[in-house]
Amino acid sequence: MPSRADIDPLELRDCLGNLCLLDVIGAGPRRFRFRVDGSNLAALTGFELTGKFVEDVPDPRYRDFLIALYERVVLTKAPVFLANDEEWKGCGVQEISVTLPLSSDGVDVDGILDAVFPMRLGEG
């Protein structure tokens, strides 16, 4: 697993607004804190999560989805690729994402990089 230090934000500058960087805190119960919530994502969802925990996501269905996704990444220590339809701020959105584990010691997942690329349904 890569560490945060392996990620160069300059290499990702074209998609920074679509990236979330999370800290994984504790082991039981585990919590996920948004170190960075991509500006494009915050604008689309209508809520800014930088500095907040996943429990602060106002939509309970989306919050449960994120917790399950992040738990899966921590437990499997493997990336998760998804394509699913969502509704954000009353608009249908197709979301393509990859959620990657990060580890400072190469053994335990202590961070997550979530790259989310939404597209309004009907756009090509």
Image: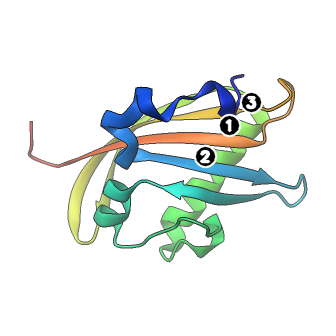
Say whether marks 1 and 2 touch (CB < 8 Å).
Answer: yes
Task: Give the quarter of the image for residue 39.
Answer: bottom left
Q: Is residue 121 left or right of residue 95?
A: left
Q: Is residue 117 left or right of residue 106?
A: left
Please tell me how crowded label 3 is: few (under 14), some (14-19), or many (20+) other residues with Cα within 10 Å: few
Instruction: State whether residue 88 is above or below residue 86.
Output: below
Task: Tell me which residue sits at (34%, 72%) in the image.
Answer: 46
Q: Secondary structure at mark 1?
A: helix
Q: Which mark is residue 69?
A: 2
Residue corresponding to mark 1: 73
Q: Which mark is residue 120?
A: none
Residue corresponding to mark 3: 76
Instruction: State whether residue 5 is above or below residue 1.
Output: below
Residue in the foreground of this view, choosing between 111 and 87: 111
Kind of residue sitting beneath label 1: Val
Residue in the foreground of this view, choosing between 43 and 68: 43
Badge 3 or badge 2: first in the primary sequence:
2
Query: What's the distance in space between the residues labelled 1 and 2, CA to CA?
Result: 6 Å
Task: Tell me which residue sits at (47%, 73%) in the image.
Answer: 59
Query: What's the distance in space between the residues labelled 3 and 1, CA to CA?
Result: 5 Å
Q: Residue furthest front?
A: 10
Say whether marks 3 and 1 touch (CB < 8 Å).
Answer: yes
Say whether marks 3 and 2 touch (CB < 8 Å).
Answer: no
Please tell me how crowded label 2 is: few (under 14), some (14-19), or many (20+) other residues with Cα within 10 Å: some
